Image (cartoon, rainbow, N blue to C red):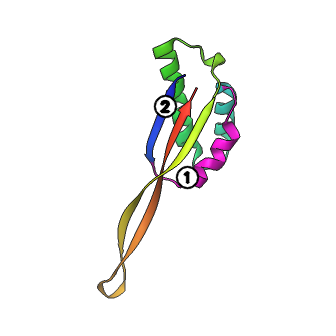
Amino acid sequence: EVYAFGRYIPMSASKAQRVIDQIRGCYYEDAINILEFMPYRACYPIFQLICAAAANARHNKGYKRIDLIISKVEVNKGTSIKKLKPRAQGRNYLIKRSTCHITIVL
């Protein structure tokens, strides 16, 4: 098994989950083709993680990319990035930007 971890990716876990459900259990080449043509913003970080996992498999274990299957994919909720937005009369408003952690196993 070969791992790739993505930490503190700036998107909600539910938005990443709907993309990951499409590629779970697919071959590496099929997953890359699916991610290239999906219209979601979450596809690009997941695409990078799958490519990183494939590079780890090739470099560390000597596997061929044709033989790789995505066996396990997890999305976990990360911490919230908190920013302050200025509002009227000197007040401020808290903006919470959610993050997620993605784990891919080939």
Q: Quadrant of the N terminus?
A: top right
Height in image: 86 above or below 49? below
Answer with the quarter of the image where residue 29 lies: top right
- Under mark 2, the amino acid is Ala
Q: Measured from the top left, where is residue 51 in percent x and y?
A: 54, 29
Q: Horizontal placement of 84 versus 26: left or right?
A: left
Which residue is the site of mark 1?
13
Q: Measured from the top left, where is residue 62 in percent x and y?
A: 52, 11
Q: What crowding class fits label 2: few (fewer than 14 Cα within 10 Å), some (14-19), or many (20 or more)?
A: many
Q: Is residue 25 magenta?
A: yes
In the image, 34 versus 13, the foreground residue is 13
Q: Which residues are magenta?
A: 9-27
Height in image: 103 above or below 62? below
Q: Determine the secondary structure under disc 1.
A: helix
Q: Determine the secondary structure under disc 2.
A: strand
Which residue is the site of mark 2?
4
Q: Are marks 1 and 2 in contact (CB under 8 Å)?
A: no
